[in-house]
Image (cartoon, helix red, strand yellow):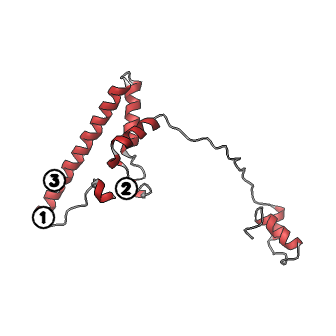
Amino acid sequence: MSWMKGDLLSKSRRLVGGLAMREPVWLKAMEASPPPVFPRSNGNLKKIVLPEDSYVRRFARKHPEAKLVDPINTVHAFIPDPARVYGCRVLELTKNGISEDDAMSVANMEYLAERKEMKKAYKRLKELAVLQDKTPPPKPYLSSKTEM
């Protein structure tokens, strides 16, 4: 029935009317209360653009290693990606009166400092795992070669 146009109700009516099938038990009940019809778009969908999107693109070009490995992972659903954090931070700084270039450099320095802290914390975790004879945790930041 996929070649027919329309919803289940109209398809069933046509098949019953053309004597291709017997009238189903549910057809009269469905005709009495048909399912809702949702409006369809005519192809003129507007692209959703957020104010920080230009900064997010610049960040992604500058730091390709910062992209998420698995964007659909539900564990990290509430943790925004670093590019989005960078874009929001630049917007926040520009609203406070800092020039765009200075805001971008400050946000970039904050990102690099946070990344450095995470690497330092991973190094310490690795040392503790070796001291306790346990397997070290997986690396939080993979190299570009490893990702490819």
Residue appearing at x 41%, y 36% in the figure: 55
- The residue closer to the viewer here, 59 or 140, is 59
* Viewport quadrant of the N terminus: bottom right
Q: Quadrant of the C terminus?
A: bottom left
Q: Which mark is residue 69?
A: 2
Nearest to the observer: residue 9 or residue 20: 20
Q: Residue at x 13, y 62 (%)?
A: 130
Quadrant hosting residue 90:
top left
Among the 4 quarters of the image, the one containing residue 31: bottom right
Amino acid type for the residue under numbered disc 1: Gln
Which label is found at residue 124? 3
Sequence order check: which comes first, mark 1 or mark 2? 2
The reply to whether callout 3 and callout 1 are in contact (CB within 8 Å) is: no
> As shown in the figure, which amino acid type bears the numbered disc 3?
Arg
Helix, strand or loop at disc 1? loop
Q: At label 2, which amino acid type do we have?
A: Val
Instruction: Report x, y in % for residue 22.
Output: 84, 78
